[in-house]
Amino acid sequence: MKIAILIYNGITMLDAIGPYEVLSNLPDVEIFFVAKKRGLIKADTGFATLKAKYNFKDISNADILIIPGSTISFIDVIKDEKTLEWIK
């Protein structure tokens, strides 16, 4: 099973790491941290980061998509056409 976790600047870290910790213990599961662009993604705290090894072109589909929340950055994400197209 392929699970994609969408990460973006301003993400609430626990919303991405919590599901990752639980789901990574399941058998036959691949989990991908995916962002619009590969690289480091800053959390809403400003000091914690996650590395996006994959971008939208790398992961075109998944069995499960997790979209973590944020304090306010999510508003920009839901307005981004490329992100919305990838989610569809």
Image (tube, rainbow, N blue to C red):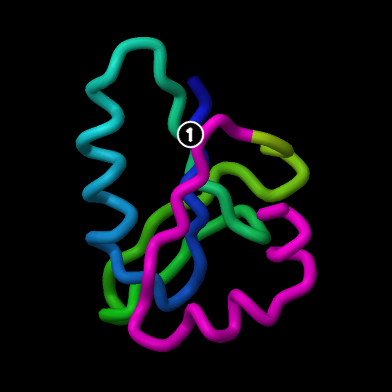
Q: Position of residue 25 (x, y in %)?
A: 23, 23
The residue drawn where x is 31% and y is 70% is: 12
Q: Secondary structure at mark 1?
A: strand
* Residue located at (71% from left, 49% from top): 56
| Residue at position x 28%, y 19% in the image | 26
**In the displayed structure, does residue 66 sit left or right of residue 25?**
right
Along the line of sight, which residue is nearer the eye, 48 or 79?
A: 79
How many numbered circles does the render carry? 1
**Residue located 67% across and 37% down the image:** 59
Q: Label 1 amino acid?
A: Ile
Q: Which one is in front, 88 or 33?
A: 88
Q: Which residue is mark 1?
A: 3
Q: Is residue 11 above or below residue 4?
A: below
Where residue 9 sits in the image (x, y, percent)?
A: 48, 73
Q: Position of residue 62 (x, y in %)?
A: 60, 33
Choose top left, top right, bottom left or bottom right for residue 83: bottom right
**Is residue 34 highlighted in magenta?**
no
Answer left or right for 29 relative to 88. left
Viewer-proximal residue among 55 and 76: 76
Residue 80 quadrant: bottom right
Q: Specify the segment rendered in magenta.
A: 62-88
